[in-house]
Amino acid sequence: MSTKLTLRLNDKVIKQAKEMARSKGVSLSRIVEDYFRSLAVRKEKEAPESPVLSEISGVLSTGIGTRKLRAGYRKHLQEKYR
């Protein structure tokens, strides 16, 4: 069963999200549903990883391993949103 959900977001964010969904060939509703589902099944309580970090982590050349970079960012988010 599907139920309608109303979200209030910045216009620019909505436009970018719709463009990204269109480029991937999926609906924005599907992306949001998948994200919420991933939060619900997550066994560990940790801050969700930023999509931007996921996309650029392989591009950055900092001399720090990807795992270490992601762990540092997760720690930053956990402290920020406590």
Image (cartoon, grey):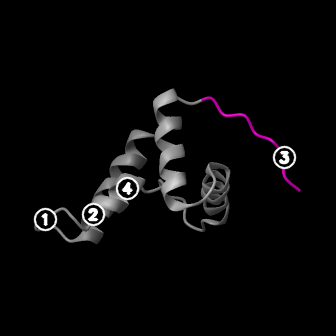
Numbered disc 4: secondary structure: helix
Q: Main secondary structure of the magenta part?
A: loop
Residue 62 in the image, given as x and y percentages of width and height: 12, 62
Looking at the rendered structure, which numbered label has been put on residue 57? Answer: 2
- Which residue lies under the disc numbered 1? 61
Upstream in the sequence, badge 2 or badge 4?
2
Question: Of all residues shown, which one is farthest toward the left?
Answer: 63
Residue 18 in the image, given as x and y percentages of width and height: 54, 44
Cβ–Cβ below 8 Å for labels 2 and 4? no
Mark 3 or mark 2: which is in front? Answer: 3
Rendered position, 79 above or below 12 = below
- Tell me: 24 left or right of 57: right
Upstream in the sequence, badge 3 or badge 4?
3
Numbered disc 1: secondary structure: loop
The span picked out in magenta is 1-8
The amino acid marked with disc number 1 is Ser
Upstream in the sequence, badge 3 or badge 2?
3
